[in-house]
Amino acid sequence: MNVDDLIDRVARDLTAGEPAAALSREVRTRIAALPRRRPWPWWAAPAAGLVAAAVVLLAIALPRPQSQPPAVPRPANAQIASGARTDLVSTPLESTPAAPARSPRRPRRSSTPAPNPVLAAWQERAVAALPGVQPLVIDRIQPLDLSIPLMEVEPLGTAPLGVPAGSSSGG
């Protein structure tokens, strides 16, 4: 017996009977007894979008604290050994009072900012920029011309392929 035929026969046996008269009523009663979930309010998705947009706008619009200039690097050991000034070693400018945060929408009243003595002293101690780097010059590594002579190959002589006479084929 085929497995498919067996499955079909069992399915017919299971569905051959008539349902009870009260089956429909019992199913409806059980469905009505299930607890109902409240549907998700339609306005929740747009409200969540507005909250996300407000957070992004606040993050952009709020003033950020101004960063301090970086510390001047220590001089090289050769400068220290040669007797160069060692008081050029600096630490980050922690004692500089932070300027009050300004709103990005207000234009400045003066086009020239007031000189900052701490910043001027930091710029005075700055190390000069390194000289420019010369580009690398390299020789070509590819050969200019290949000097391989052309090879000639003579054709191979073979006897024609076939079944010798007097032998049986298909053996």
Image (spheres, grey):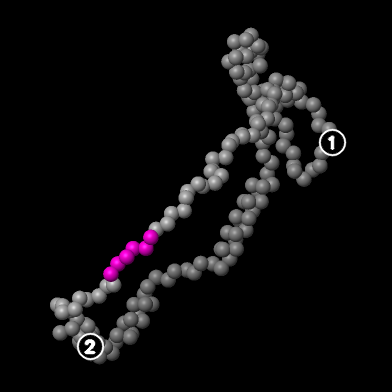
Mark 1 surroundings: few (<14), some (14-19) or many (≥20) residues within 10 A:
few
* Residue at 36% in and 81% down: 28
Mark 2 surroundings: few (<14), some (14-19) or many (≥20) residues within 10 A:
few
Magenta segment, which residues? 154-159
Identify which amino acid the numbered label 2 is placed on: Arg
Residue 40 image label: none
Residue 111 screen position, x and y as percent:
84, 36
* Left or right position of 92 against 39: right
Would residue 117 be visible to someone looking at this image?
yes
Q: Residue furthest right?
A: 110
Dot placed on the residue nearer the N-terminal end, 2 or 1: 2
Residue 18 screen position, x and y as percent:
25, 90
Q: Nearer the viewer, residue 62 or 148?
A: 148
Magenta-colored stretch includes residue 156 = yes
Mark 2 and mark 1: Cα distance apart in space: 93 Å
Residue 51 screen position, x and y as percent:
61, 56
Identify which amino acid the numbered label 1 is placed on: Ser
Q: Which quadrant of the view contains residue 128?
A: top right
Where 74 falls versus 52 (above or below)?
above
* Residue at 60% in and 63% down: 46
Q: Residue furthest top?
A: 83
* Left or right position of 94 against 160: right
Where 109 falls versus 162 (above or below)?
above
Would residue 14 be visible to someone looking at this image?
no
Q: Main secondary structure of the magenta part?
A: loop
Q: Quadrant of the C terminus?
A: bottom left
Q: Look at mark 1 in the image and give the residue it sits on.
A: 111
Residue 67 screen position, x and y as percent:
66, 33
Q: Which quadrant of the view contains residue 158?
A: bottom left
Q: Quadrant of the N terminus?
A: bottom left
Residue 12 image label: 2
